[in-house]
Image: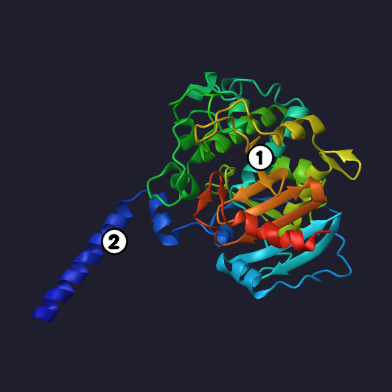
Amino acid sequence: MVRKRWIKIVVLILMAGVFVYLCLPTYMQKAFIYWYPDISDTYIFASNTVHKADSCWEWPVASDVNAYRMDEAEKDYLKEYGTVAYLVIQNDTIRQEEYWEDWTPHKISNIFSATKSVVALLVGIAYDEGYIESLDDRVSKYLPEFEAGDRITVRNLLTMSSGLDWDESYAALVSKTTQAYYGDAIRELILDLKVVEEPGKKYAYKSGDTQLLSFVLEAALRRGEVSTISDYAEQKLWKPLGAAEDALWNLDRKGGDEKTYCCFNTTARDLARLGRLMLNHGNWNGRQIISEAYLHEAVTPASYLENEFGDGPLDYYGFQIWIMSYRGMRFPVFRGLGGQYMYVIPQKNAIVIRLGHKRSDEYVRELTVDMTGYLDIAMKILK
């Protein structure tokens, strides 16, 4: 009798759980299924293909590639955070390249917020080509349907100083970031944002700024009959840079909008092409892909803004690109959730890429503490 009663209770609880689940918005249902985002999420979303080049430019590989043998402490460090790819390039030559799990030079994965830096490059190209007339244009010039557009400029979005009401949390079930990641109506979510702080005064990292920026870019490009951000990335970056693999840009739904704040999927080697472009001041084998002037501003801290800590000018962020200080050097970094990092180090003419499942949750000001560890290893490899 007692056993039957407990069975009924369990069944009722399960039925109630199913009922609650079915009543949740679609994005919450997906969040419960997939939970915390991971680099392996590539194929759970619809995507646009960013096609590889017709003729690939290959990275030369050093004759003594992987000559550096990591000690046990270094191996444990990479393993601790679930590293799947570690790539060190210097003077256009692969010096170290290692993969774990089932990753290879040909396997793509989500670079998460490093995608923001890709968007910044595309904005620069569109600005050079005149699609965006001025970085100080109001958003309303391109998106008249966005109510707060008269108060925000393209530059505000590039520098994360929009003042919009965005909550930056993947872990919270009801956050705007979770809704953007798992939802199917990202444009409506973004166009409903409100200004809650004066724009152009203080830096505050907000994925919504990047997504809105891409809608501005898309609207500007449509004047030239470019249909999607993915198409523009293919025409202006992926094919000119001789990419070896197709990339995927995840969408909020089939035929929908690119999730530009997070979800570009590529390989370590192809990501490194963007680093090479930056090392060469926007020039790729004699072709100026993006102007040196724009790129210089993009990797210069927007020091006219107050930093997020409220104790001085911003000294670590430019146009959707981080600027890192390390051993007396300062250089640009692409950063993404879970520790997707590309360090572009002009002082060494080098690119260091680390992709993986996790990063440290501990911060020293704007940096997670794991970021320096990958560089410490790289410096033993670089000449």
Q: Amino acid at mark 2?
A: Val
**Would you call the spot at circle 2 few (<14 residues within 10 Å), some (14-19), or many (20 or more)?**
few
Q: Secondary structure at mark 2?
A: helix
Residue sitting nearer the eye, 77 or 157: 77
Question: Which residue is outermost to the right?
Answer: 286
Residue 170 image point, x, y percent = 46, 50
Residue 102 seen from this side:
no
Give the numbered dot on residue 18: 2
* Residue lying at 47% horizontally and 44% vertically, measured from the top left: 177
**Mark whose residue sits in front, 2 or 1:** 1
Residue 253 image point, x, y percent = 52, 48
- Using residue 382 as the reference point, say whether residue 35 is left or right of it: left
Residue 199 image point, x, y percent = 52, 24
Residue 267 image point, x, y percent = 70, 59
* Residue lying at 73% horizontally and 33% vertically, measured from the top left: 124
Give the numbered dot on residue 286: none
Q: Amino acid at mark 1?
A: Val
Residue receiving disc 1 = 119
Quarter location, residue 128: top right
Whether residues under marks 2 and 1 lie with C-beta atoms below 8 angstroms apart, the answer is no
Does residue 24 lie above or below 313 as drawn?
Answer: below
Q: Secondary structure at mark 1?
A: helix
Does residue 144 lie above or below 112 as drawn?
Answer: above
First in residue order: circle 2 vs circle 1: 2
